[in-house]
Amino acid sequence: MLYIANSRKTIRHNFSACPLHHILLRVEQDSLELLGIAEDEACGVAGESVHSAFSGRKVVCSELYKLALEDLWGKQDWKDACFWGIGSNGFMQPYFLFNALADSFPTRRNIMDSRAFMPVVSLVKFAAPFTEAGFEDMTFFALRPHPDSLIISNLETMEVAHSEYFAKIWEALPSLEIEGPEEVASEMAVTLSVRAKYQGEPLEHPLDVELEHVNGYLPKTRVRLNGVARFNVMALGLAAGEKIKIKAGFRYAGSLAEKTLRVI
């Protein structure tokens, strides 16, 4: 699926007066190709030589970007539940791949705020729900650079309002739930469980879940789950009436689920 929304402002290539107009995206089982296109009557080539949709127009094209699935899997920051972008520092500059969640995680800013501080034009983004995901398991996103832009893809497409765009990103990634008792005795331990869901359904793919705590003690701060995993929480050094907060998330997406235990 490819979700498309209108950009809040016209995206310009090379940060000049000539706007980037169109995007060609082709996604296969183990590869993707991306091409940026701008209309230029003075310097362009015949549009039909690029795609029939541009017949009768003069266009200039970016360098064709190709990404193989095996190269994506080989990235050092290829982790569960990540949101990737393909960007450049200008229309005629080489494209590069970046992990948007990894960029925003250190400051805990949201994805859109983090990218706003960097001079990157990001044409296409995609959500990878788990490390075993193929391109067919991923959800793609594109911002229309200009109200008249064409975004041409072999994927099924859906138009969404810009205000819904950010929410769709998180819907394309797994969610977590922490279950278990509400109380723990001082100096004692209880067992909690964490479950994963994807688009409202239980997710059976293996996932590495990161655990954090405020107060108390966690013997394990990372658990491997395949649908569900259990872990212990200990109320060491805490008196009755104090509280423990447990958070669960992924390597670059923390605190997706929280649970508070009351010490008795």
Image (cartoon, rainbow, N blue to C red):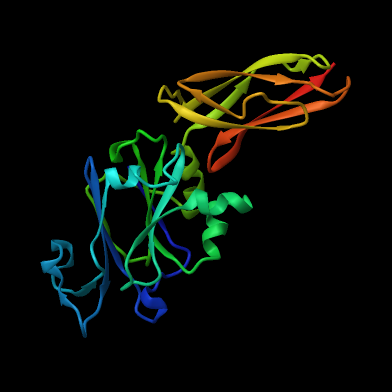
Using the image, determine if residue 64 lies above or below residue 68. Answer: below
Q: Quadrant of the C terminus?
A: top right
Residue pictured at 81% horizontal, 14% vertical: 185
Residue 251 left/right relative to 217: left
Residue 68's x, y, as percent?
Answer: 25, 48
Q: Is residue 184 visible?
A: yes
Front residue of 47 and 191? 191
Residue pictured at 42% horizontal, 77% vertical: 15
Q: Quadrant of the N terminus?
A: top left
Residue 207 left/right relative to 23: right
Residue reaching furthest to the bottom: 42
Residue pictured at 48% horizontal, 69% vertical: 119
Using the image, determine if residue 214 lies above or below residue 181. Answer: below
Front residue of 73 and 140? 73
Q: Is residue 25 visible?
A: no
Picture quadrant of residue 261: top right
Residue pictured at 39% horizontal, 81% vertical: 16
Picture quadrant of residue 152: bottom left
Using the image, determine if residue 27 lies above or below residue 243. Answer: below
Residue 189 left/right relative to 230: right
Residue 207's x, y, as percent?
Answer: 46, 29
Residue 124's x, y, as percent?
Answer: 36, 55
Residue 123 left/right relative to 33: right
**Number of marks in the rendered image:** 0
Front residue of 130 and 219? 219
Residue 161's x, y, as percent?
Answer: 45, 52
